């Protein structure tokens, strides 16, 4: 049984980590979050030392390490805001633990190099949750693409619309410097999936970008991708709005839908199982999508070529 600490216990994604820790037969020893709305802990573990101040949490974890009495931390699970991931990963390695971090590992690609140096210095590992890589439908598609001998590039339309209210823009998520913006905060898993399946980025174009939506075109080794990401409920397709849905996700591959709406329940647990077996996704696995999101964030708006524009993006370009 391994001992875990959790940073960001009140966060949206924290329950998936709590479930993964429990389902893999391990133990949550302590947790921290500036918010004390963490009753969710009791659904999984009822003897967790909880802190709202990181300094006190730091001191507690260090004391456990020095005592070496069976409660020392082996893994730190990180569910904090994006801009804090780098610091919290460093904390994990400093207290002789491995880090398991939500997306993205960091916001800027060069920070990955610093983390790689710390890995070498400490002998501990940094893992990223890239759960779409183990989704059965996506694994099946990647196997198919890898075994193809044709040079044909598929045309892909990636659409992800997840409605968010005004609160979003008053939180860290709406702050470009803290979240990385729409492309990073809601898009990075999809960018990781696409580059994992269809190869390296050869060209990046951004046709539209504001605080609620961003869209453009990617040329990959084996695919051309028209992509559109949005937080605006007005971008939802009419059918989704009529059904009262607030989220719409679609990946069309040459007009054929990639069905992966189900199968998400246990993906975090499966990633944890892999990590505990000494596998898991590390720094170099995370690098392509972090570099891509960074370039999108800093790209100049390009002239739109009609054939490269996502259908839902067209209405914003024509205004």
Image (cartoon, rainbow, N blue to C red):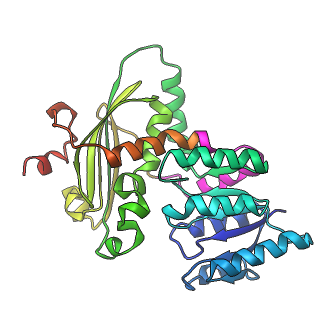
- Residue 183 at x, y percent in the picture: 36, 51
* Count of numbered circles in the view: 0
Is residue 199 shown above or below 14?
above
- Asked whether, in this view, residue 19 is left or right of residue 68, the answer is left
Is residue 95 shown above or below 64?
above
What is the quadrant of residue 164 in the picture? bottom left
- Asked whether, in this view, residue 85 is left or right of residue 176, the answer is right
The answer to which of 191 and 117 lies nearer the viewer is 117
Q: Residue at x 55, y 53 (%)?
A: 105
Quadrant occupied by the N terminus: bottom right
Residue 275 highlighted magenta (yes or no): yes
Q: Is residue 259 visible?
A: no
What is the quadrant of residue 284 in the picture? top right
Q: Residue at x 57, y 46 (%)?
A: 112
- Residue 69 at x, y percent in the picture: 92, 72
Tell me which segment is drawn in magenta. Answer: 262-284
- Asked whether, in this view, residue 282 is left or right of residue 163, the answer is right
- Asked whether, in this view, residue 25 is left or right of residue 214, the answer is right
What is the quadrant of residue 211 in the picture? bottom left
- Considering every residue shown, the one lying at the far left of the view is 319
Residue 97 highlighted magenta (yes or no): no
- Residue 129 at x, y percent in the picture: 59, 52
Is residue 228 shown above or below 43?
above
- Residue 243 at x, y percent in the picture: 26, 64
Q: Is residue 243 visible?
A: yes
Q: Residue at x 70, y 61 (%)?
A: 92
């Amino acid at each position: 049984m391994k001992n875990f600490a959790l940073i960001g216990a009140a966060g949206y994604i924290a329950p998936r980590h709590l479930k993964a820790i429990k389902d893999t037969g391990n133990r949550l020893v302590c947790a921290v979050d500036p918010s004390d709305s963490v009753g969710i802990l009791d659904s999984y573990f009822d003897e967790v030392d909880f802190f709202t101040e990181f300094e006190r949490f730091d001191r507690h974890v260090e004391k456990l390490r020095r005592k070496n009495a069976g409660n020392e931390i082996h893994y730190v699970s990180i569910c904090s805001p994006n801009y804090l991931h780098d610091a919290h990963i460093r904390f994990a390695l400093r207290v002789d633990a491995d880090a398991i971090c939500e997306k993205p590992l960091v916001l800027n690609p060069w920070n990955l190099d610093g983390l790689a140096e710390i890995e070498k210095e400490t002998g501990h590992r940094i893992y990223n949750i890239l759960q779409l890589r183990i989704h059965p439908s996506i694994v099946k598609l990647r196997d198919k693409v890898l075994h193809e001998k044709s040079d044909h590039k598929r045309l892909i339309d990636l659409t992800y619309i997840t409605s968010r209210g005004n609160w979003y823009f008053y939180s860290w998520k709406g702050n470009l410097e803290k979240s990385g913006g729409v492309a990073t905060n809601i898009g990075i898993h999809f960018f990781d999936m696409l580059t994992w399946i269809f190869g390296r980025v050869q060209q990046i174009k951004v046709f539209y970008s504001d605080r609620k939506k961003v869209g453009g075109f990617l040329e990959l080794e084996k695919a051309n991708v028209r992509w559109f990401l949005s937080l605006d409920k007005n971008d939802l397709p009419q059918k989704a709005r009529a059904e009262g849905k607030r989220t719409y996700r679609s990946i069309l591959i040459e007009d054929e839908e990639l069905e992966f709406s189900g199968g998400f329940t246990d993906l975090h647990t499966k990633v944890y199982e892999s990590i505990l077996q000494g596998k898991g996704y590390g720094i170099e696995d995370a690098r392509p999508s972090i570099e891509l999101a960074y370039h999108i964030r800093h790209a100049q708006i390009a002239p739109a070529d009609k054939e490269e524009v996502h259908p839902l993006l067209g209405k914003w370009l024509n205004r």
